[in-house]
């Protein structure tokens, strides 16, 4: 009988909750997230507006140009820009006029094999060259307002309170003795907040 009573008491004690163990256990916890969003601007191509995908705004242009002549890319035969490939707008997450930005352009020459056509705004002569025109509106400074020799430099500047758009077009002069081939070059536009 005594053994049964002791065994029953042991079972009863084992069934009681241990207060110290359950007091330290919680049924929930909280993660606190702190995110700092920096002021900045992005370049957005109007052709992406319909899809909502601004992750890729790259554009490509091609044209066959005869020796001794001028040709335009993203422009008509008079050099006036077209908008088939979209225009680029600058979107900022701040509207303070004191917040300014710079759009820089980095170019490499139009290259075929080991032959390169460098930047130059020519209409005739013995030297081939290519030039860029910004076709920008609303910019504070606009060094490529007319066709200017392609070079890696400041493309335009502006402030976050202004509506700024641009649509680069390109002029290529091919000298009479320029070697035939498919020449490829790039102009890369990058925006940074000043």
Image (cartoon, rainbow, N blue to C red):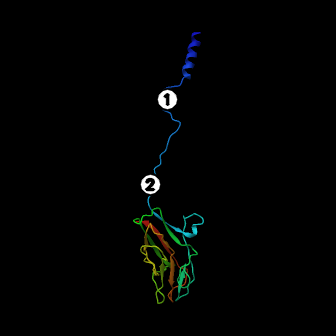
The first of marks 1 and 2 along the sequence is 1
* Residue 50 against residue 14 in the figure, above or below: below
Q: Quadrant of the N terminus?
A: top right
Q: Quadrant of the C terminus?
A: bottom left
Residue 59 position, x and y percent, is 55, 72
Residue 88 position, x and y percent, is 52, 71
Tag 1, which secondary structure? helix
* Residue 147 against residue 96 in the figure, above or below: below
* Residue 192 against residue 110 in the figure, above or below: above
Which callout, 1 or 2, points to the residue nearer the camera? 2
Which residue does the image show at 49% across and 29% down from the upper left? 21
For this rendering, which residue is in front, 110 or 43?
Answer: 43
Q: Quadrant of residue 87?
A: bottom right
The local crowd at label 1, few if under 14, some if 14 to 19, many if 20 or more residues have their Cα within 10 Å, is few
Contact, mark 1 vs mark 2 (Cβ under 8 Å): no
Which residue does the image show at 50% across and 82% down from the upper left? 171
The local crowd at label 2, few if under 14, some if 14 to 19, many if 20 or more residues have their Cα within 10 Å, is few
Residue pushed farthest top? 1
Residue identified by numbered label 1: 21
For this rendering, which residue is in front, 111 or 159?
Answer: 159
Residue 4 position, x and y percent, is 59, 13
- In the image, which disc is placed on residue 116? none
Tag 2, which secondary structure? loop
> Separation of disc 1 and disc 2 at Cα?
39 Å
Residue identified by numbered label 2: 36
Residue 179 position, x and y percent, is 52, 85
């Amino acid at each position: 009988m005594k053994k049964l009573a002791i065994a029953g008491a042991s079972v009863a004690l084992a069934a009681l909750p241990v207060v110290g163990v359950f007091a330290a256990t919680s049924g929930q916890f909280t993660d606190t997230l702190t995110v700092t969003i920096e002021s900045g601007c992005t370049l957005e191509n109007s052709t992406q507006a319909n899809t909502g995908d601004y992750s890729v705004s790259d554009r490509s242009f091609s044209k066959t140009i005869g020796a001794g002549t001028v040709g335009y890319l993203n422009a008509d035969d008079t050099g006036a820009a077209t908008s088939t490939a979209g225009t680029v707008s600058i979107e900022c997450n701040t509207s303070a006029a004191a917040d300014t930005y710079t759009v820089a352009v980095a170019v490499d020459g139009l290259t075929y094999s080991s032959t390169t056509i460098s930047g130059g705004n020519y209409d005739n002569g013995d030297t081939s060259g290519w030039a860029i025109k910004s076709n920008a509106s609303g910019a504070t400074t606009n060094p490529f307002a007319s066709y200017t020799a392609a070079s890696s430099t400041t493309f335009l500047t502006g402030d976050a309170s202004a509506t700024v758009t641009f649509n680069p077009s390109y002029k290529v002069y091919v000298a009479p003795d320029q070697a035939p081939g498919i020449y490829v070059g790039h102009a890369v536009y990058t925006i940074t907040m000043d």
